[in-house]
Image: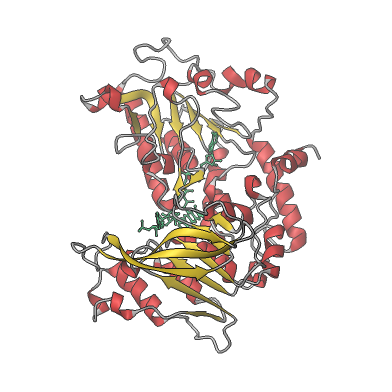
Amino acid sequence: MRVAIIGSGPAGFYTAYRLMSKIPDSIVDLYEQLPVPFGLARFGVAPDHPEVKNCQDKFEEVAESPNFNYIGNVRVGHDVQLSSLKAHYDAMIFSYGASEDKKLGIPGEDLHGVFSAREFVGWYNGLPQFQNLAPDLEAGDRAVVIGQGNVALDVARILLTPVDKLRHTDITEQALEYLSRSRIRQVRVVGRRGPLQAAFTVKEARELMNIENVSFEPIDPSFYPTDIKKLPRIQKRIAEVLLKGPKNPPTHASKSWALDFLKSPISFNPSPSTNNLTSITLSHQTFAPTADPLSKSASVVPTNETSTLPTSLAFRSVGYKSTALPGLSDLGVPFDTKLGIIPNDPYGRVVSPSKGPGDLAAAHVPGFYCAGWVKRGPTGVIASTMEDAFISADVVASDWESGVPFLNSAPGGEGKSTGLGWEGVREEVLGNGVRALGWSDWKRIDEVERERGGKLGKEREKFGSVDEMLGALDG
Ligand SMILES: Cc1cc2nc3c(=O)[nH]c(=O)nc-3n(C[C@H](O)[C@H](O)[C@H](O)COP(=O)(O)OP(=O)(O)OC[C@H]3O[C@@H](n4cnc5c(N)ncnc54)[C@H](O)[C@@H]3O)c2cc1C
Ligand SMILES: NC(=O)c1ccc[n+]([C@@H]2O[C@H](COP(=O)([O-])OP(=O)(O)OC[C@H]3O[C@@H](n4cnc5c(N)ncnc54)[C@H](OP(=O)(O)O)[C@@H]3O)[C@@H](O)[C@H]2O)c1
């Protein structure tokens, strides 16, 4: 069995691992658009969470298998067409994540000073695409983050953590330099619903409460029932942390953070004479008459009240978004733009509504599968992405064993896969001037990054551009 997996984040690696253990003679080609692997485990996970990146050790182990090929620096749908790949594989598994972000769709989103959290996170984590972001952390002393998920708290924490505490992490030197000059003293994290509906988890809230000399604006206890012990366990633990406030109440708080609830942005406002952000107008919300304010899923409705929050820096942190790869529809693979996923049965078989209604097999687009954020939407931690990838790999293996049609054995297919995999398209791709990399190339980049980091007392200093990564290979 020859399989192409597209995207080398946690979903791609865990799918490869599971598939190779279920079907020991399967050969997996893992395509990655960047020279370097691991997706958000490298470019999303916060630099002060090094333990989370330990999943990379497992991925390194997976890559040692003789049945595994890494094809880095090849962007599927651009550097190589999906239709060219198809002839050479039995199955294709999409695990290319979510490389866009959701917009709010309100005036002023493009103002100078308004960023998406995805850009900012990518910037401090060395993602080549965002190394020229240049967020102005000196224009004012306040930053506002819209959205109350864990990404929002990552952004707040990076802005508030003393820069010396970040020096030994793998945050980029550029980000350290900007943060050391930052004038940000207050970060407000704004949610459209209440504290019992916030999407962040207790560990991330506690980390903010543990930063030295950072105070927290007390939250209105009337959001909670009088006896918080009656709340479901997860909400109870978050409530305890938020109501208690900072671990060591600061004697001299130089910085602060706050959570604003029941507020939804309606515009980012510029100064009259420039394109620079100066404030955000928020619409005040209230729980819908039929909603239970204690329920995690409580809905809200706007009131007539608005307020204006002055700030020169804002981050939109309302979720990432997947998009369709060019050429998907030519292969009969649909994409749900509303949900931002490749439609699939709950196990990861790509299904085409146009082929139904009927039983699952009738709707499955033979040979196509998906895993990770592009399968279920942009939520879930690495552990849940792993579970989800295992489920996808398990259905590929069980479909293979049960003899259902795969890519080229399906009606309308060309009969049989050439079985050549990457070798079937290699010449064409290289002929187009693409420099495809193998695992040993990544290991060399890794080594040089570690050497650079060692000189600075950190684990690694990432290369900030694809050219630099490729340059490291040329000595
Ligand atoms: C800011 C942030 C912080 C996070 N922190 C944590 C944390 O602390 N702990 C935790 O457990 N989880 C964390 N998560 C969640 C975790 O990162 C995700 O669950 C996981 O990375 C999703 O894996 P994935 O493989 O589906 O997507 P991704 O990790 O996004 O991987 C997708 C890969 O596909 C590649 N790709 C995209 N398009 C193409 C193409 N056309 N051709 C080839 N390759 C392509 C991308 O370059 C990328 O490498 C965080 C997420 C974010 C956004
Ligand atoms: N340390 C970690 O473990 C860690 C770190 C970072 C990320 N992650 C994981 O990565 C995943 C993605 O995180 P995320 O923070 O991007 O997404 P998320 O958890 O889905 O949070 C998105 C937030 O944005 C809000 N929102 C969405 N649309 C909005 C709108 N139009 N206006 C105002 N607010 C809006 C949501 O509020 P509503 O609930 O009202 O929709 C929610 O508060 C999550 O599963 C997260 O746990 C984990």
Quadrant of image for the C terminus: top right
Question: Would you say residue 283 is visible in this rendering?
Answer: yes
Farthest-out residue, front? 272
Q: Name the residue located 49 percent from the left edge and 16 percent from the top edge.
A: 87
Against 364, residue 318 (above or below) is: below
Q: Report which quarter residue 350 is drawn in.
A: top left
Q: How many marks?
A: 0
**Residue 334 x, y percent position in the rendering:** 38, 28
Farthest-out residue, right? 475
Q: Name the residue located 44 percent from the left edge and 66 percent from the top edge.
A: 190
Q: Name the residue located 47 percent from the left edge and 81 percent from the top edge.
A: 247
Seen in the image, is 225 located left or right of residue 314? left
* Quadrant of the displayed image that contains ligand 2: bottom left
Q: Report which quarter residue 434 is drawn in.
A: top right
Q: In this orientation, which residue lies closer to the viewer: 310 or 125? A: 310
**Residue 321 x, y percent position in the rendering:** 45, 44
Question: Would you say residue 390 is visible in this rendering?
Answer: no
**Residue 469 x, y percent position in the rendering:** 72, 42
Q: Report which quarter residue 398 is drawn in.
A: top left
Seen in the image, is 284 located left or right of residue 137? left
